[in-house]
Image (tube, rainbow, N blue to C red):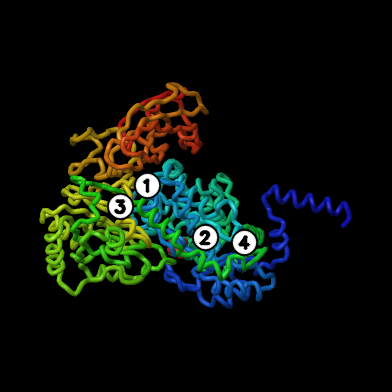
């Protein structure tokens, strides 16, 4: 090559790199026809997994072979994926491999707790390890792209998908988002055990009106920026490879066609340079939203900044026509195609389309003893001890124990919602777990009640298999059997709550209490006078005012995953001292919803513990929740003292170092999650009374006393003001440190 040509080439490559263009991708784009580019924007599912909409893609094989598909999901296993990949690579002109996606939401085959449960560990190392394990297993099965993490902030427990996220708090949510992206991607997308992550659902999907799934979202920008957007942004900052849009509208425009969201915010403001995909048929659904026909909504979405169309095929079937009619430009299609190809390039598929297809790997990497041990640990760390009347827990391993309740021996309900790659048959039931861990105990089991007695309700829940099985025996017979078993025992453990599919997608409830059949069982068990432990299983916070008042112990276990029974037994029998803390606020009743800890003061704050006319309170219930954000007990007790700040006054850009002494004053070794809340007393936008701004999980042996260090960075003092600038404003701040969001140790400082 002549020297001048080489210099020219070098210059072109450097310019491309400067614009973050990948020369190999640009060269490929040069060769592609309009048709081939549009084909890459099509993401299909041939079925086989759980379809989450009414449409399943047709003729996928022919479409792949004719270059009409850029990626597929719902196909797994090296052999099956190889077939699909060969369709693409051996038949299409340019041999472009497929992205192979999946919903690996809480573990691939080794299912770990639902994400809401996992977030209650507040343990970012563990969460990262969980995601890393999921990536290792999924990639062993041929998957290179994961539709996770789901980081939607949710403050309305009626919404069933609250189960899939990290709860209500933007600070904690951002940390979890970052940990999961790191876990899936490990900063090396082309490694054969990492996968592209996809943060979802941009944006605000967790705030539908009245908690009804897919419902309208209406939110001002200040709230959006301060309370709902931080976790998505954290995932972007952590280098997430792709973003999925949400079903809902934002300021009247559905996310998939929202230019402000996808271009102004995501691309321009946050600098996201990766792939943006729709949710399942969310482009087509814009027709029902009222934005025009398929051609119009597809053009709108492409122009807004969407690159790939999931299942709906609006891009595939209308974009060519739209180019002809000057409704979109070929350059816009090329840009979207570039993003799809770049994702493939980054995951190493161009180098080797079969890189994730080693048939030896599933046996080696999936459901290993090591993975199951991690799932067991993750589950135990996700449980939250809500109450421990008379220290009923832990139970001695030689107890005479009655194990009752419709979830005590219900394999089908252990994995939790949205575990399409997990196998419920592999789950350890509570009955099995108890026998494994406490082989010296005398355990007698009785079902005691149906999850629900309503056959119509059961039908709605049993869509993916039997979750609620209504017993042939009458409810009275079930109850009497349980009471008889209880009476011959020294302690009763009742496993009650929600079936798996009572939370999750399209599983909103307007009454989030424990179903009546089970409530009755609980009351009657307590009336026997035996010590009662409620192991409460659910995919969301529940309203439990009556149960919370009973003289019982309550261990909230969410849906714990494949090692459910073993992990619950570890905690119930004291092999692990529970340390989880709630990441959602639990309401007293439905009327308090939406409910969350970082509320504002209002102009007429309610007085404490009493009603006052013309104040912001209710006639019939206190403003406070039943159980606060950040709350969770341990078998031991922790005392806090000596809160100190290193400065009383700081300048802009300075940090504050905080120390507090924490002492384990009880009889067990244990972990405590030390929490830091901040109050900004005066600013130009009404501040929340408290905001979480730091936490640290510490292990203390019994009797041990330790100084715990925390830090407030300059960013922790900032918020988005009325012009959406991220600023801190001079004035006084109060710092609270303690065991939950009611922390009472307090110190203040002034930002000059
Ligand atoms: C869900 C997404 C999921 C997609 C593909 C949709 O219904 O909202 O979270 O990734 O289906 O399965």
Please tell me whether mark 1 sits on a helix, a strand or a loop. Answer: loop
Are circles 3 and 1 on residues that touch, CB within 8 Å? Answer: no
Mark 3–mark 1 Cα distance, whole angstroms, equals 26 Å
For the residues carrying marks 3 and 1, which lies nearer the camera in this image?
3
Mark 4–mark 1 Cα distance, whole angstroms, equals 34 Å
Q: Earlier in the sequence, mark 2 or mark 3?
A: 2
* Residue at 21% in and 41% down: 622
* Residue at 75% in and 52% down: 13
Q: Earlier in the sequence, mark 2 or mark 1?
A: 2
Q: Is residue 253 visible?
A: no
Q: Which residue is mark 4?
A: 344
Please tell me whether mark 4 sits on a helix, a strand or a loop. Answer: helix
For the residues carrying marks 2 and 1, which lies nearer the camera in this image?
2
345 left or right of 445? right
Q: Which residue is mark 2?
A: 136
Q: Which quarter of the picture shows residue 486? A: bottom left
- Specify the quarter for ligand 1: bottom left
Please tell me whether mark 3 sits on a helix, a strand or a loop. Answer: helix
Residue 23 against residue 96 in the figure, above or below: above
For the residues carrying marks 2 and 3, which lies nearer the camera in this image?
3
Q: Which residue is mark 1?
A: 168
- Density class for disc 3 (Cα within 10 Å; few <14, some 14-19, many ≥20) is many
Mark 2–mark 4 Cα distance, whole angstroms, equals 18 Å
Mark 2–mark 1 Cα distance, whole angstroms, equals 29 Å
Q: Which residue is mark 3?
A: 571
- Density class for disc 1 (Cα within 10 Å; few <14, some 14-19, many ≥20) is many
Front residue of 463 and 685:
463
- Density class for disc 4 (Cα within 10 Å; few <14, some 14-19, many ≥20) is many
Farthest residue in the right direction? 2
Residue 696 against residue 283 in the figure, above or below: above
Q: Is mark 3 within 8 Å of ligand 1?
A: no
């Amino acid at each position: 090559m002549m020297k001048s040509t080489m210099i020219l080439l070098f210059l072109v490559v450097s310019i491309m790199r400067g614009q973050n263009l990948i020369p190999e991708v640009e060269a490929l784009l040069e060769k592609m026809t309009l048709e081939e580019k549009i084909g890459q924007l099509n993401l299909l599912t041939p079925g086989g997994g759980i379809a989450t909409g009414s449409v399943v893609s047709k003729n996928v094989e022919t479409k792949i072979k004719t270059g009409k598909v850029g990626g597929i999901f719902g196909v797994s296993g090296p052999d099956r994926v190889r077939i699909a990949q060969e369709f693409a690579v051996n038949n299409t002109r340019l041999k472009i491999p497929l992205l192979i996606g999946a919903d690996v939401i809480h573990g691939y085959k080794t299912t770990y707790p639902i994400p809401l449960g996992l977030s209650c560990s507040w343990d970012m190392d563990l969460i990262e390890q969980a995601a890393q394990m999921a990536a290792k297993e999924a990639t062993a099965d041929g998957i290179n792209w994961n539709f996770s993490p789901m980081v939607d902030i949710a403050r309305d427990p009626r919404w069933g998908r609250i189960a899939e996220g990290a709860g209500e708090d933007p600070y904690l949510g951002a940390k979890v988002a970052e940990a999961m992206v790191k876990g899936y991607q490990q900063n090396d997308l082309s490694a054969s055990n990492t996968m592209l992550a996809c943060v979802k659902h941009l944006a605000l999907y967790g705030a539908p009106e009245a908690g009804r799934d897919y419902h309208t979202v209406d939110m001002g920008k200040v709230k959006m920026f301060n309370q709902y957007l931080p976790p998505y942004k954290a995932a972007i900052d952590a280098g997430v490879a792709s973003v999925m849009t949400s079903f809902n509208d934002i300021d009247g425009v559905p996310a998939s066609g929202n230019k402000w969201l996808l271009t102004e915010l995501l691309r321009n403001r946050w600098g996201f340079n990766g792939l943006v995909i729709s949710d399942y048929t969310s482009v087509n659904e814009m027709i029902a939203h009222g934005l025009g026909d398929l051609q119009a909504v597809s053009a709108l979405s492409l122009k807004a900044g969407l690159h790939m169309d999931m299942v709906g095929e609006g891009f595939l079937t209308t974009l060519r026509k739209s180019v002809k009619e000057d409704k979109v430009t070929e350059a816009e299609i090329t840009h979207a195609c570039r993003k799809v190809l770049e994702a493939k390039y980054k995951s190493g598929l161009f180098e080797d389309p079969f890189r994730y297809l080693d048939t030896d790997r599933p046996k080696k990497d999936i459901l290993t003893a090591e993975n199951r041990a991690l799932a067991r640990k993750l589950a135990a760390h996700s449980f939250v001890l809500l109450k421990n009347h008379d220290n009923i827990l832990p139970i001695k391993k030689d107890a005479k124990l009655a194990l009752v309740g419709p979830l005590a021996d219900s394999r089908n309900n252990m994995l939790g919602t949205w575990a399409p790659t997990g196998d419920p048959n592999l789950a350890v039931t509570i009955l099995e777990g108890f026998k494994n861990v406490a082989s010296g105990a005398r355990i007698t089991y009785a079902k005691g009640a149906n999850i629900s007695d309503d056959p119509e309700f059961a039908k709605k829940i049993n869509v993916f298999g039997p979750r609620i099985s209504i017993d042939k025996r009458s409810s009275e017979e079930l109850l009497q059997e349980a009471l008889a078993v209880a009476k011959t025992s020294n302690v009763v453990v009742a496993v009650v709550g929600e079936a798996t599919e009572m939370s999750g997608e399209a599983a909103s409830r307007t009454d989030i209490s424990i179903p009546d059949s089970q409530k009755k069982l609980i009351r009657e068990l307590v009336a026997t006078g035996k010590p009662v432990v409620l192991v409460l299983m659910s995919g969301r916070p529940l309203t439990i005012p009556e149960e919370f008042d009973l003289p019982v112990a309550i261990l909230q276990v969410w849906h714990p995953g494949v090692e459910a029974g073993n992990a619950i037994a570890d905690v119930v029998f004291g092999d692990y001292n529970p340390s989880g803390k709630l990441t959602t606020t639990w309401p007293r009743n439905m009327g308090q919803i939406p409910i969350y800890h970082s509320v504002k003061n209002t102009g007429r704050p309610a007085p404490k513990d009493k009603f006052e006319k013309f104040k912001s309170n209710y006639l019939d219930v206190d403003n406070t929740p039943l159980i606060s954000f950040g709350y969770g007990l341990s078998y031991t007790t922790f005392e806090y003292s000596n809160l100190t700040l290193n400065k009383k006054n700081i300048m802009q850009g300075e940090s504050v170092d905080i120390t507090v002494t924490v002492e384990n004053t009880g009889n067990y070794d244990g972990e405590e999650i030390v929490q830091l809340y901040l109050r900004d007393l005066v600013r130009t936008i009404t501040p929340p009374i408290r905001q979480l701004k730091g936490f640290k999980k510490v292990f203390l042996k019994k009797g041990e006393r330790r100084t715990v260090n925390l830090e407030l960075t300059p960013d922790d003092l900032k918020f988005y003001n009325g012009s959406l600038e991220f600023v801190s404003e001079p004035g006084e701040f109060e710092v609270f440190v303690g065991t939950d969001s009611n922390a009472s140790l307090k110190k203040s400082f002034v930002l000059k």
